[in-house]
Amino acid sequence: MSSGIEIKQNNPSYRFSVLLLLVLIAGFSQGMLLPLLAIMLEQAGTSSSLNGLNAAALYIGILLASPFIEKPVRKYGYKPVITVGLILIILSLLLFPFWQVFWFWFILRMIVGIGDNMVHFATQVWITSTSHRTKRGRNISLYGLAFGFGFSAGPFMTRLLSINEFLPFIIAGLFSLFSYGFVLFLRNEWPESDIETAKQTGTLDRYKQVIKLAWFALLPGFCYGFLEASIHGNYPVYALRSGITIEWVSILLPAFVVGGLITQLPLGLLSDKWGRKKILLTVTFLGSMSFFSMIFVEQSYPVLLVIFTLAGALVGSLYSLGVMYLADLLPKNLLPTGNVMTAVSFGLGSILGPLTGGILIDLMDRGSIYFAVGGILLIIFILGIIYKEAEPTSIKTAATA
């Protein structure tokens, strides 16, 4: 029995599979909470602005935790950080139905955000740092696929509200508990050279180096957070006010994520061949045009479904493409810091997304969400044209700083 456990602990394939499962579960809880709580708050008579603020709480938690995650991972390793993150997620999910009060849910969403960030950061750095350069694009694409599968399954939990309000939360909590059983068999590991890097340079200096070398690679994470939170946190409210039924919302949201799943691996492989920046510019521009076009077809549900799927196929890989691009631009000793800053960027976008969407829903009768998401994609496209990659000598200098 002990030899079997040891084989699992030393098996890179087992470790990679477990890390993908953890990302899937984290994506599932995130994808469930955004539309589920948005619908419950809307039905309780909460304004769209406050609804957006409540949705932003999850990402406030992500943002608050980001500056403090790198040090515990460096000191205690990946496994303990993942364990604490899972415990926070499980406890919060099980507490949601017991007291349906706005600020109680706000606090619980922040705690879920903190737990999600701990799981995401530890798994992301673990996968990135242990992947060979020739397999990095593939592995990070699979990471994005796992998150996408979980995230696309989450909105289906809204259908269980008609059966029992406790049921979606119990199912999500049990899934998280199930995944922890596999974590127990993982051997703990630590980021390579992190302690040495921390002694050589301060945290602020490493942040400055990342921004100098790869500021544009941080923006896809911001953009993905903005559109993901807007679509899953604001769109249910916008749809219900526009006459779109909950049943269609529960189809449109997964369709967007499924579109991203279909192209996740192909876009990762294309970026290996054609370059990350070219792919990022292409998907942000075409994605922007897709969202703007939804303004004219939202009353034709089948057409809207097709464009939703197409938009997901174009922009659903933004986060993973940004992580790949970041790994290409940075020396290895700056990768943990770069991943922290990606999480911060994602958190900022995810906070601004629901807040912007909620305000626009109150101000505009039609097309508010499409304008918000299409506009941010267009801005990222323009900034990508402006960005110039650093010379290889600059990257080598940063690696030895």
Image: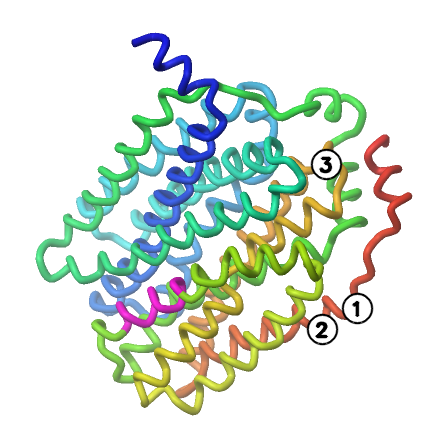
Q: Are marks 2 and 1 in contact (CB under 8 Å)?
A: yes
The type of residue carrying mark 1 is Ile
Asked which quadrant contains residue 229, the reply is: bottom left
Examine the residues drawn in magenta and state their main secondary structure.
helix
Depicted 377 relative to depicted 219: above or below:
below
At 65% from the left and 65% from the top, the residue drawn is: 279
Crowdedness near tag 1: few (<14), some (14–19) or many (≥20) residues, C-alpha within 10 Å: few
Q: How is the rendered protein coloured?
A: rainbow
What kind of element bears circle 1? helix
Mark seen at residue 386: 1
At 43% from the left and 18% from the top, the residue drawn is: 9
At 44% from the left and 62% from the top, the residue drawn is: 262
Q: Which residue is mark 3?
A: 334
Q: Which residue is mark 2?
A: 382
The answer to whether any part of residue 351 appears in the image is no
Please state if 163 lies on the left or on the right of 145 as rendered.
Answer: left
Depicted 362 relative to depicted 319: above or below:
below
What kind of element bears circle 2? helix
